Amino acid sequence: MFESKYSKVLTVILVVVIVAILGLLGFLGYDWYQKYFLENDAMAFVENYTGDVEDTTEDNTNPEENTTATNPIDSIEKTNTVSGSSGNKMPTYKGFNVVGTIEIPAISLNYPILEKVNTRSLETSVGFLYGAGINQVGNSVIAGHNYRNGLFFSNNKRLNIGDTIYITDNSKNRLTYKIYNKFETTPEDASFYSRDTGGVPEVTLSTCNDDSTTRLIIFARAE
């Protein structure tokens, strides 16, 4: 009698363990599926978006010859809009208006920058949160989630001072930014959003840290 009850208890425990394992595998499989297709869709969009922009990411024997093509700061139309597109219709990505793209080779990041920051947009890509406008003089804040799985800004913690960020806007201006500051602050701190950039474009990347208690902030300046 006792052995029969013991066997039933073991069977129930075994069934619960199996169900838990299957649930975990299903969750991990869905997470991988979501990450894989989101990253591939984003990369395909960025490649198409930047397809007619001169590629200046490769090493060059005479980099001074490409300075203007890489960083056409002087020729950028100062529109003070998030689009920087001189009134042209914005491209879209998964139903959201796009104001530019961001590429960070050090962490293999390639995403469209969406015009709006809200719950749905930040589940799709990174977004323009505040500032002068993409590749415009002044500071522009770009926000993205840290899902701790490699998506969006999950790997920003691996970035270092001196790493390169490429940002292309809707006018096909492609600027090279260099990271010069990295720190953590409270989620409520926005004191650095409006700052003197010395007459050049800057970007601020904002995301949460791995336990969501603080914000990881990265400053980068166009060169």
Image (tube, rainbow, N blue to C red):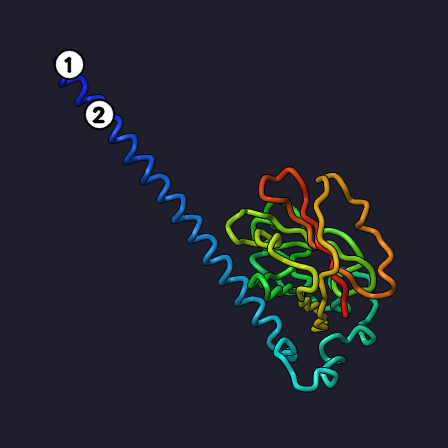
Q: How many marks?
A: 2
Q: Is residue 190 above or below residue 90?
A: above
The amino acid on which the numbered mark 1 sits, given as a three-letter code, is: Phe
The quadrant of the image that shows the N terminus is top left
SS for dot 1: helix
Give residue 6's position: percent from left, percent from top. 19, 19
Q: Is residue 171 above or below residue 116?
A: below
* Structural distance between the alpha carbons of marks 2 and 1: 12 Å
* Extreme residue in the top direction: 1
Give residue 48's position: percent from left, percent from top. 57, 72
The residue labelled by disc 1 is: 2
Task: State the residue at coordinates (36%, 44%).
Answer: 26
* Quadrant of res 4: top left
Mark 2, residues whose alpha carbon is within 10 Å: few (<14), some, or many (≥20)?
Answer: few
SS for dot 2: helix
The amino acid on which the numbered mark 2 sits, given as a three-letter code, is: Leu
Task: State the residue at coordinates (61%, 70%).
Answer: 49
The residue labelled by disc 2 is: 10
